[in-house]
Image (cartoon, rainbow, N blue to C red):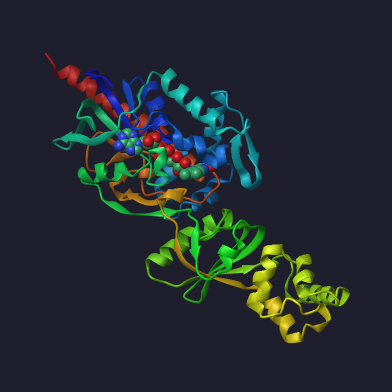
Amino acid sequence: MGADNTQYDVLIVGGGAAGLMAAGRAAGAGARTLVLEKKDRTGRKLNITGKGRCNLTNAALMESFLERFGSGARFLRPAFGHMGDKDLVAFMEGLGVPTVVERGSRVFPASQKAGDVVAAMRDFARTSGARIETDAPVRRIRAEEGAVTGVELKSGEIRSAGAVILATGGASYPATGSTGDGYAMARELGHAINTIHPALVPLETGGEAAPKLQGLSLYNAGVSVFINGRKKRRAFGELLFTHFGVSGPVILSLSGEIVAAQLQGHEVELRLDLKPALEETKLENRLLRELDQRGGQHMGNLLRGLLPRKLVAVCLEQTGIPEDRTGNQVSARERKALRTWLKDFRIPVTGYRSFFEAIVTSGGVRLKEVDPKSMGSRLVQGFYFAGEVLDIAADTGGYNLQAAFSTGSLAGTSAAQYALARHSETAAQSP
Ligand SMILES: Cc1cc2nc3c(=O)[nH]c(=O)nc-3n(C[C@H](O)[C@H](O)[C@H](O)COP(=O)(O)OP(=O)(O)OC[C@H]3O[C@@H](n4cnc5c(N)ncnc54)[C@H](O)[C@@H]3O)c2cc1C
């Protein structure tokens, strides 16, 4: 990395989804733009999104789209107005990345390759005229008299510009480069940071069930969340048992509320419905039929017709039914215990996994201090934000990347406008 004395208009800290989009927009608007990326490559996290397939947005209607962001929805409305899901899809098509809509209105590149999105975003930034400097970690943002003047790299070098966009992402999956550096940089310039937590994160559970069941996936489990003994939410979907607890799409989606409850010291319990398609009477009839038709079999065998093998042992243990009891020996009380367990398998939640395993970070730069129409700081002139560094986080389904792209696009456009206007003012004033 050599000294670079160029006078830039816009500096972008972080070359992820938001930073690359911001770079292309700012450079495309005529601003001399530089992206400073701390890793050896831009877009490392983008490259692993959607299990390598990149679920880049969601085709849901705007109102239900916004709902996924909870309290961040109002803030994001102008950014989504500036660049919504259809705009993003058209934009990707324009870059040679056609898309397909899959189950749950999730949008993926037709090639099913996140790498194609990364390559397209890098090309977009570069062909728009932005420079990208890798292995260039930024230490702080410099400001004088209430306006940014540039950044200081960890190497001590300075890069100057009239506008700086902070696009350092969250603190999850730190190996991708998103180590939460941006929070300290924003704080140093007076911005409040709402406490950060892992979100869309696997859960740790108590008891022996999870370790015994590790590796087992339930493709359609009903999961109810009980907080201090009261039912708060119910969802359906795929659940995976791990050595520490539970993961999988349904758990990640429920994790936000569970982490929040745990932080407040509340007790959380998951109650699994292993037969969500059968209501109680139908389940009772099914059990009666199985016990009758296969009455000579030991329960250890008989239950394999109803449950995956790993679950059978846990079921017998928790219902107290001996493994060698035959179907026709099962009492009405035991049958009831079995029925109850199948609909209400309880697992206490003891914690959640760290940022290393969290898909996103909740918390971040307080939204009140950012203008939603420009992504500009309300405290420091020429300072802009984009992406997950802001206090925004949504469910899985492509919402988080759309938020990164939309806020990146808006921040890039606004920062370029600001810096170019300032530039021409200065030029007009100079003799
Ligand atoms: C495994 C996984 C799968 C995911 N799948 C999906 C999905 O399919 N769909 C979806 O919508 N969302 C998904 N997400 C979430 C999504 O990836 C993020 O919300 C999104 O990448 C945020 O974009 P960003 O540009 O704000 O931050 P990032 O993509 O995290 O980019 C931030 C960049 O800033 C750089 N940086 C950090 N600090 C510095 C510094 N000091 N100096 C210079 N550069 C710095 C980092 O190296 C990084 O390149 C997934 C996340 C993970 C972890």
> Does the rendering let one see residue 63?
yes
Question: At x 20% / y 44%, what residue is drawn?
Answer: 188
Residue nearer the viewer, 154 or 329: 329
- Where, by quadrant of the figure, is residue 156 drawn? top left
Quadrant placement of the C terminus: top left
Q: Position of residue 267 (x, y in %)?
A: 45, 73
Q: Residue furthest left?
A: 431
Q: Residue furthest front?
A: 324
Question: At x 13% / y 16%, what residue is drawn?
Answer: 430
Residue nearer the viewer, 183 or 329: 329
Q: Position of residue 303 (x, y in %)?
A: 76, 70
Question: At x 23% / y 25%, what residue is drawn?
Answer: 159
Residue nearer the viewer, 336 or 430: 336
On screen, residue 278 above or below 380: below
Residue nearer the viewer, 88 or 154: 154
On screen, residue 169 above or below 162: below
Q: Is residue 97 left or right of residue 200?
A: right
Question: At x 67% / y 59%, what residue is drawn?
Answer: 220
Q: Is residue 211 left or right of residue 24?
A: right
Q: Position of residue 193 (x, y in %)?
A: 29, 51
- Image quadrant of ligand 1 equals top left
Q: Residue furthest top?
A: 431
Q: Is residue 83 left or right of residue 101?
A: left
Quadrant placement of the N terminus: top left
Q: Position of residue 405 (x, y in %)?
A: 45, 36
Q: Is residue 125 left or right of residue 325?
A: left
